[in-house]
Amino acid sequence: MPIHLENTKFPTVGPQPLNLSTRGNVSSGDGVLVGGFVITGTEPKTMVLRALGPSLSSFGVTGVLSDPVLNLYNSSHTLIATNDNWQSDPHNADIQKNGLAPARLSESATFQTLAPGAYTVIVKGKDLATGIGLVELYDLSPLSNSELKNMSTRGPVGTGDDALISGFIVGDVGNTTVVVRALGPSLGRFGVSGVLSDPTLTIYDSTGTVIASNDNWRDDVNAIDVQRNALSPPNERESALVLHPPAGAYTAVVRGANGGTGIALAEVYTLH
């Protein structure tokens, strides 16, 4: 069940992720959609962050979030940017110039130039509204001496269309190494309640073909590579996959084994 990724043109660059988008059910409390990313290197990175809701109905999604609100925090948990309606962003002209203006005025977007470090983006519904939302990160400076090394999204996993669905785009004509993880039980140690007890992970390419899947990470044929890169999930029921994908768009779908539901975390790591 791949999700739609914007048809944005990026320059040809070395292997690195250029876009991450995750669709999930946005509720209240721990049920908000939480995205995290890490910028490494020596130069700032220019990005556009978006939170969509109403426009998802154009792709057949029902029960969409009517008015998403986006908040961006730095590693000190300080709020550094917030947006409700994208046209109120101070750099809305840059958002439009890059072809990333959301389809609906009530959707959120912010144009940011961020120093290396860790960041968190949280998507909530205005006035406590709930529904299906999409959080997106776009890298507009792939030629800079910095890169996105880790991107993750936390959100509720339900049944049917309420899976946690993450899409990522890999640049370059060659291959890169990507580790994708789906965590659930280990989130409890960070105070998250109602976690997904047994997450499963399935990766699709742009044609909707399954290219990899995993339930328990130790069962994957590349489990030793996950360990070697210090990315072993803390719980054996959590999932992890090592991929060597060529340039293109990919989708990671997190569900609960045997129809389980709860809060889960989808993560994408790039290795060289």
Image (cartoon, rainbow, N blue to C red):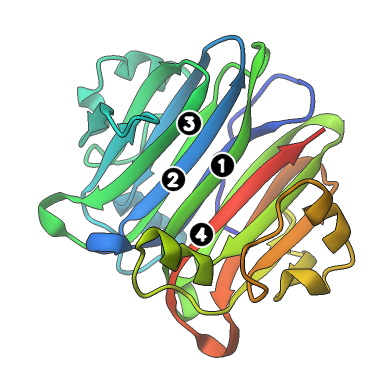
Q: Is residue 39 left or right of residue 14?
A: left
Residue at 32 percent across and 52 percent down: it is 53
As measured in the structure, the alpha-carbon distance from the residue carrying label 4 to the one carrying label 3 is: 16 Å
Quick one: label 3, few (<14), some, or many (20+) residues within 10 Å? Answer: some
| Chain-order first, disc 4 or disc 3 | 3
Inter-mark Cα distance, 1 to 4:
10 Å
- Residue furthest out toward the bottom: 258
Res. 35 mark: 2
Return the mark for residue 118: 3
265 above or below 246?
below
Image quadrant in which the N terminus is located = bottom right
Which residue is tagged 4? 265
**Could you tell which of marks 4 and 2 lies nearer the N-terminus?**
2
Q: Which numbered disc covers residue 151? A: 1
Query: Amino acid type of disc 1?
Result: Met
Apparent side of residue 208 relative to residue 129 in the rendered image (left or right): right
Residue lying at 47% horizontally and 41% vertically, measured from the top left = 36
The answer to whether marks 2 and 1 mark residues whose Cβ atoms lie closer than 8 Å is yes
Q: With respect to residue 90, does 62 lie above or below?
A: below
Q: Mark 2 is on which residue type?
A: Gly
Expressed as whole percent of the image width and height from the top left, the position of residue 211 reads 81, 63
Marks 2 and 1 sit apart, C-alpha to C-alpha, by 7 Å
Q: Quadrant of residue 191?
A: bottom left
Q: Helix or strand or loop: what does disc 3 sit on?
A: strand
Dot placed on the residue nearer the N-terminal end, 1 or 3 = 3
Left or right: residue 257 versus residue 92 is right
